[in-house]
Image: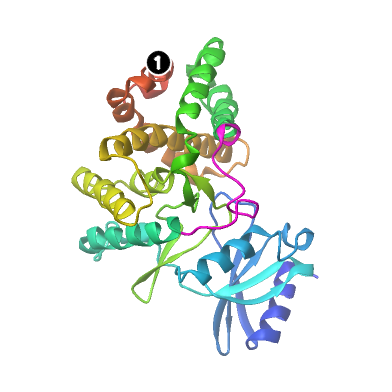
Amino acid sequence: MTIQKNIAALFSNCCSKPLSITKIQGDASSRQYFRVTGTNGSAVACYDQALNTSSADTYPFLLVHTLLSRHALPVPAIMAIDAEKNLLLLEDCGDLLLQNLFNSSREQTLPDRYREIIDILVQLQAIRGHNDQIPFSISFDKEKLMMEFDFFIQYGLLDYFAPSFDKELISILRYEFETIAELLVRPQHFVLNHRDFHSRNILIHHNKPVIIDFQDARMGLPQYDAVSLIKDSYVQLDPSLTDELKAHHYHALSSNELTSMSFDEYLFYFDIMAFQRNIKAIGTFCYQTRIARNHNFEHSIAPTLAYLPDYIDARVELKRAGKLLQTLLEGTGQ
């Protein structure tokens, strides 16, 4: 039986007779999404091959969904599950992404919308749990950060950018990446992070933000999610709004006793984290372009690279890595 037939059967059992099943363009993920429209409403079906090899106690999406729902975070409701068929049926929260507000009639609402989303982020980052349970048992430790740096090296420097990058510099650059990763492993400052908190993973439904794609949540510096939102690869915020949102995030963390950093420390780790996060994103885009043959992400490589010179100029800890990446940065303002 095909995925669509399994979706139709699940939707029929829980909702109504399905009239149409349309595949939804997903992000850089192995999961597949479909919108199911029936005689009595619609839903979004998620097909994930990892579901039937997991249980409710081990499947990250269900664990994090339960956690976020319990703390009143805005996430789509789960309508039905068929683990044997690898299917989840979720509330349909529409297809208006935060990204879609840019260059639209709603663009003037963006500052207020982003402030609202920062407040939601802090609500998420305030969640506490047992450190032997997902997502609190996993973190952005050095191994994870270096895995992301190495992904960039493999698919960015040794593939996509190979014609313009001297591979003899790889070992020196990797040493710099290790030094940067060590700066970011500060468990005393760790909070819960969504892990992919950007404009394509926030829907606007009934004029309210809804968070999706949260199954990879883990512990890390609070700046990780803030960087994903404020230094987004898919949209660019006005510099004045960028500065305002950093301050808004910091003061919200501080007032909720979620950080002991000074504001200067917050800004320092924001820049170092932004460098790592943007490098990680570039690696993903290069992989999608060259290996997955998905060219929907290639146009995001240049704007993400263009963020890097500001961090490199601001922080001496990034100077050497920046110099080694010079050939990539030419033309971005560096």
Observer able to see residue 100: no
Tell me if 243 is positioned left or right of 148 in this view: left
Please state the extent of the stretch shown in magenta in the rendering: 127-144
Residue 125 in the image: above or below residue 328: below
Residue 87, image x and y in percent? 70, 68
The amino acid at mark 1 is Arg
Q: Nearer the viewer, residue 221 or 129?
A: 129
> 260 and 153: which one is in front?
260
Q: Looking at the image, is 177 positioned above or below residue 241?
A: above
In the drawing, does residue 6 fall left or right of residue 216? Answer: right
In the rendered view, how is the structure colored? rainbow
Q: Residue at x 26, y 40 (%)?
A: 263
Q: To which residue does mark 1 refer?
A: 320
Q: Secondary structure at mark 1?
A: helix
Quadrant of the rendering where the C terminus is positioned: top left
Residue 75, image x, y percentages: 49, 69
Q: How many marks?
A: 1
Residue shown at the point (77%, 63%) measured from the top left:
52
